[in-house]
Image (cartoon, helix red, strand yellow):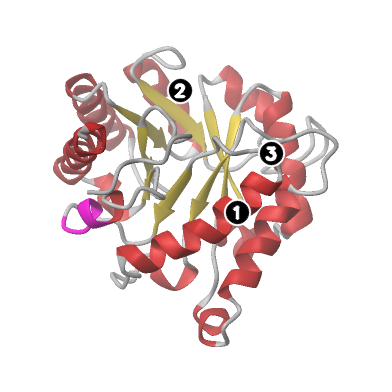
Amino acid sequence: MPPARPDAPDRLLVAGNWKMNGSRALAAALAQAALDAARAAPEVEVALFPPAVLLPLVSDAVGAPRGPVAVGGQQCHPEAKGAHTMGIAAAMLAEAGCRYVLDGHSEVRREYGYDDARVAAAAEAARAAGLRPIVCVGETRAERDAGQARAVLERQVDAVFGSRSAPLADADVAYEPVWAIGTGVTPTPEEAERAHGWIRARLDAAGAPRSRILYGGSVAPANIGGFLSRPGIDGVLVGGASLEAASFTALVVAARAAAAARRRP
């Protein structure tokens, strides 16, 4: 395995996005599994992103925000408060024990109309509330086939990190090719790392060299090792595989092995 880059984050991140799935019983079981996995693999950072109604239960179960498992919201509203039915303010997430918040997942962009400007505003709101946003970017199949993937990723990254008076250093990025989410079809690790390289160049230009870049899109125990073997990939954002305790535990175990390999000369 190639060595990690000199400015790489201290720990790989394995983040589970439950999307609109779960129950109190399932949340309790998954939280316990994540807690056990995190305690057995302190070299890996573990985070859970449950639906908002399950946040208090999960936060209590893992001892958030200071426990070994981080908790995050799936999106925050750009405004701090107001007449925004169904909206969730960043401060509400922080009060519920969150350390992170996803921002601009492709499903949020598509279903709730979050364009680049709104994603950028939500990232600012998250930071103002003390949360670390994970900004989701990715191209569709049509954009990929048209040779527009790089331009799409650069536009999405620049909307949040570029054109700022001060660097947005306390935020991460998740590269989730839209065509790979939930399909079982993924780019090769080399293709994913090439996309991460485009993103890294934009982050470096914006003064955010230590922002992590996660890969997401049909991540599973069978393929996580290939992705984390690439030094440009700093962790994974997992969907379906995070809804089963055994598979999520296997992902953390694989990340621990990848972290150990990166430390070897």
Task: Estimate the spatial distance between the alpha carbons at disc 2 and disc 1, rounded to whole Å.
Answer: 38 Å
> Is there any visible trace of residue 89 in the rendered image?
no
Comparing 84 with 130, the one in front is 130
Task: Tell me residue 246's x, y (percent).
Answer: 14, 42
Q: Find residue 69 and report its image quarter.
A: top left
Magenta-tinted stretch: 222-226
Foreground mark, 3 or 2, reads 3
Task: Estimate the spatial distance between the alpha carbons at disc 3 and disc 2, rounded to whole Å.
Answer: 35 Å
Classify residue 77 as left or right of residue 191.
Answer: right
Q: Earlier in the sequence, mark 3 or mark 2?
A: 2
User: Which residue is depicted at the point 53% across and 31% down?
Assistant: 100
Comparing 134 with 21, the one in front is 134
Asked if residue 221 is positioned above or below residue 5 in the image, the reply reads: below
The amino acid type, in three-letter code, at marker 2 is Pro
Crowding at dot 1, Cα within 10 Å, few <14 / some 14-19 / many 20+, comes out as few
State the SS at label 1.
helix
Number of the label disc, if any, that sits on residue 56: 2
Q: Quadrant of the C terminus?
A: top left
The amino acid type, in three-letter code, at marker 3 is Gly
State the SS at label 2.
helix
Asked if residue 87 is positioned above or below residue 56 in the image, the reply reads: below
Number of the label disc, if any, that sits on residue 201: 1
The amino acid type, in three-letter code, at marker 1 is Ala
Q: Is residue 94 magenta?
A: no
Q: Find residue 82 and report its image quarter.
A: top right
Number of numbered tags placed on the structure image: 3
